[in-house]
Image (cartoon, rainbow, N blue to C red):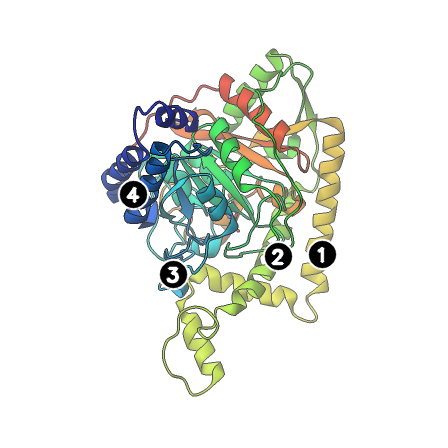
Amino acid sequence: MTIREIQTGLREKTFSAKEITESFLHNIREKEPQVHAFLTVTSDLALQQAQEIDSNILKGKEIPELAGVPYSLKDAILAKGVPCTAGSRMLEHYTATYDAKVVENLRNAGAVLLGKTNMDEFGMGASTEYSAFGPTHNPRNLSMVPGGSSGGSAASVAAQECLVSLGEDTGGSVRLPASFCGVVGMKPTYGTVSRSGVIALASSLDQVGPFAETVQDCENVFRVISGKDEQDATSVLYEYGDAVDPMQIEGLTIGVPKEYFAKGLDPDIEKRVREMLGKLANAGANVQEVSLPRTSEALAAYYVINTSEASSNLARYDGIRYGHASGMHLSLQEAFVANREAFGEEVKRRIMLGTFALSAGYYEAYYKAAQRVRDLLRKDFSEAFSKADVLMGPVSPFLPFPLGERVEDPLAMYLVDMYTVAANLSGIPGISVPIGSARDLPVGLQILAPHFKERLLFSVAKTVEQIADTSYHSGV
Ligand code: GLN
C-alpha cells in the first residue's frame, strides 16, 4: 500500500482507518517475535485515533493528507503518554509528557502512531545492537543487522509492520538502516525539521528524517514534518511545497566522488552503484567524477564532534534532573556515579572520549582541529556542487553484516559510517534509495544535494527508483 492508496480507499470507503490500523497491528503481532523492531506497541491509542478519523470521515469532514497512515517512531522522539527510552536503561521508566513537534505535525495530518522503535542507545551505533533491550533483526535476512541507529524504524517499514516511520540521523542513522533494509530513508537539510521533543545526541548534527517504501511516501512525510518551529531555535523558515515529478535526467550533472569508491568498498556494492550510474548516463545524464578530498578525515572529525557534544548533552542524566535513580546516597558524587551505571558500554565510551576531547589542554588539538576539518569539508562540497547538481555514491562500504560481527569492536562499527557522516558535518540533505541487491542483501544508492535542495533530491530519487531493479526476497 502507498499513502495515496490509503487516501483513495478512505475517500471511496473501500476500507476504514480502523481496518488499516488493525491489519498493520496484525502484521506486528505476526512478525515481531522474529524482527523485534518495536520497543512499545501503542495498539489502544492507535485504534482510538483511527476511530476518530473514521468518525470525522463519516461526518463529511475533509480527509487530511496522512489520514489513517500507520507510522512508527524512533524511541528518541517523544509522543505524549507513551514510554520513551532512547534504547537506554537510563530512561527505561520514562513516559513522555508532551509531543515532539514532528509528532504533533503527523497527528494533525491524521497519521496513526503504532509504536516506538528500537535503536542503538541514544543513537550511538550503526547496527541497533547497542540497544539496551536486545537487537533488531533485518527483515530481509534475519541473521543480519538492520543497520542503525534507527534500525527498528527501517525494519518496521521493511517488514510491513507500518507504512512509514520517523528516525533520526546524526551521522547516517536514517540512510544506513534504509540501505540495509531495502527501504527509502532521507536526511533533511539541517534546520528544516524541528527537534523540539527529540532526545539529543549531537545537536549540531542531529536531524529527524522519514522512512518509507517509496520515494513518494517519504516526500509526503517530509512535507508534513518540515517547517519553522518556535520551540527549536535552530529551525529555519522553510516550506517544501507540492510533490515533485520524477527528474528529466537529460542535462542533469551527477558528480561521483572518487573517494567514495576507495579501497575497502565491497566490490558487489560498487558493481550495483556503477550499474545504476551507467543507466543514468544512458538516459542522458552527464556523469562526472568529482573529488571530496577530506573524506578520509571526515570520520575522525565526526567522532570527535559527536562524542564532545554527546558528553555535554548526556550530562543531564544524573538521576536527579533526569534518568535512572538508584536510591539514597550520602553525597552528590556517590549518587552521580551510582545513577550513571544505567548507561551501556558504548555510551560510557563516548562520554569519556568527548570529555577528554573538550578538556583544557586537549581542546585545541582535538575539538578545534575537528571543527577545522568540518569547515574544509563544507568547502569540498561547495566545490563539488559547483560542478554537479547532485552527488551519488554508496551509502556504506559494507553490506548488512551478521549480528554479533562488529559489536565488540567499536572502530569496525565506526567504519560503517564512512560515507554518511559528511552530510551531517556539512548540513546538506541526503537520501538512500534501494537499487537492487548483492549476495541477496539490499543495496542503497546515496544521493546528496546542496542545502535546501530537497525538491531536487526527491525528484532525482524518484527517477532512480523508476530505473532500479529491487526484487530481493524478504526474510519475513
Ligand atoms: N553510527 C553513527 C554513530 O554511531 C550515526 C549515529 C546516528 O546517526 N544517530 O554515531
Q: Is residue 399 visible?
A: no
Q: Residue at x 68, y 54 (%)?
A: 370
Give the spatial CA distance, label 2 vs label 4: 44 Å
Spot occupied by residue 363 in the image (x, y as percentages of width and height)? 69, 65
Q: Secondary structure at mark 3?
A: loop
Q: Quadrant of residue 324?
A: bottom left
The front one of 398 and 316 is: 316
Under mark 2, the amino acid is Val
Residue 353 position, x and y percent, is: 56, 63
Please say if 50 is above or below 469.
below
Cα distance in 3D space between marks 2 and 3: 31 Å
Q: Alpha-carbon neighbours of circle 2 within 10 Å: few (<14), some, or many (≥20)?
A: many
Q: Is residue 207 left or right of residue 85?
A: right
* Foreground pick, 329 / 105: 105
How far apart marks 2 and 1 lie (CA) works out to 9 Å
What percent of the width, then of the height, locates residue 57? Answer: 37, 33
> What is the quadrant of the C terminus in the image?
top left
Q: Earlier in the sequence, mark 2 or mark 3?
A: 3
In the depicted view, which residue is nearer to us: 60 or 106?
A: 60
What residue is shown at x 55% (from left), y 35% (from top)?
223
Q: Is residue 388 above or below residue 230?
A: above
Q: Earlier in the sequence, mark 2 or mark 1?
A: 2
Task: Find disc 4 in the rendering and name its residue.
Answer: 47
Q: Earlier in the sequence, mark 4 or mark 1?
A: 4
Separation of marks 3 and 1 at Cα, in angstroms: 39 Å
Mark 3 and mark 4 lie on one chain; the one further toward the N terminus is 4
